[in-house]
Image: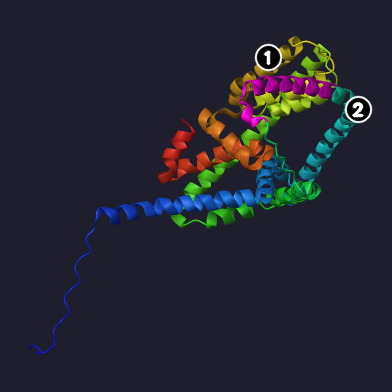
Amino acid sequence: MSIEGVQSEPAAPPVRETPATTYVANVGNPALRIIALGVVVAFLSWASSVVIAVLLAVLLAYFLDPIVTILEHVHIPRALGALLVLIAAMAALGALGYAAVGRVDTFASDWPRYNAVFKRTATMLDRKLNNVEQQVSALTPNQDRGRVAVRVEDSQPVRTLLLRGLGSLYSILLLWTFLPFMVFFMLAGKRRIWQSTIQLFPEGQRRAVRETLDQVSSMLRSYVAGNAFVAVILVAACAGFFWWIGLDYPFLAAVASGVLNLIPYLGAVLAWLPPFVIGATQWKTAGPFLGVAGVLTLLHVIAMNVLMPAIVGRRVHLNAVAVAIALLFWGWMWGAAGLILAIPMTATLKVICDHVPSWQPLGRWLGA
């Protein structure tokens, strides 16, 4: 039976895929990922003080967790054990700081003597640069000699320095005020935080998440403990060497050089600075400077290629290119804190990539 006068609307023609529509569909998802990555980087730069404090608290919590677990096995409540361990750690740091304060005060009282040497060196370099500039200007055309150089100065230098100092002070207060509390809460509530983190994922993925968290925990604990042990060895070796060559303030220079020597690649050069500064008033020739540079570079090579692989093993397995890129990026973004956190963050990223199928190529590249 048909109804006259009523015509059905023709069906819409099928959408024909063109190369342009296919290209837009394929590019949309990567573009969103790039935008999301940019937002994350901007947030890490804007909230750097908070993020750095949280990451340092995580590292310290992983480092102190085995001691809290041992106390828990001898029937000490976890919260009380975390408090005792944290107080002991802060007391140890306070004792080291108190021992170093006297040496720092003595070095500060002798600073005018070092400052005079630096001023003479700076004056000599400035004189040589002026001579080179005069020789170069003699070779340039005369048309530029009549021009007046315009010097632009900051109209409010005091205000700028004050605001910058207040920002740095805020970061330091935020770090040292909240860091102990965050470490305590992470140690005391480890199981609840662990279970709550796993519950965030679907049932079928919780086993993989648990394995990932176990590997991250083992890796971070090995990295922090290994670096602490290697730092003690480097400080002891540097102190013995500086005492043997008769360097002033051997312990103070050894602590600074030993800690700086832990930075991959860059530490081989940064460790030279403390003995170079202290030895500037003692050494009149280049021989002692070259000798110190050679010994500290040798210690860096031994620490990075023998001690760290033997202590940390393959739990932090990153290739040299990935380490260099991580140090450059995080050092540029967060400064000294970025150099400290670059390796553990990159190693954690590698562990996560190894357990996510779509990210496994990136994990293989990081560990190649």
The numbered mark, 1 or 2, whose residue comes first in the sequence reads 2
Q: Residues within 10 Å of mark 2 (few under 14, many from 20)?
A: few
Q: Is residue 27 left or right of residue 156?
A: left
In which image quadrant can residue 230 be found? Answer: top right
Disc 1 marks which residue?
A: 294
Q: What residue do we see at 62% from left, 54% from top?
A: 193
Q: Measuring from the top left, give residue 3's x and y in whole percent.
A: 10, 89
Label annotation for residue 106: 2
Q: Are marks 1 and 2 in contact (CB under 8 Å)?
A: no
Could you tell me the amino acid type at mark 2?
Answer: Thr
Tell me the colour scheme of the image.
rainbow
Where does the image place residue 69, in percent across and percent down from the top left?
69, 43
Q: Amino acid at mark 1?
A: Gly
Q: Identify the residue at image location x=87%, y=30%.
A: 104
Helix or strand or loop: what does disc 2 sit on?
helix
Where does the magenta region start and end? 117-145
Left or right position of 106 against 347: right
Horizontally, residue 238 falls left or right of residue 94, namely: left
**Is 6 contained in the magenta span?**
no
Residue 367 appears at what percent x and percent y?
A: 48, 32
Nearest the viewer among 133 and 22 is 133
The residue lying toward the viewer, choosing from 157 and 352, is 157
Residue 251 appears in the rendering: no
Q: Which quadrant of the view contains residue 282? A: top right
Q: Main secondary structure of the magenta part?
A: helix
Seen from the viewer's position, the closer of residues 178 and 113 is 113
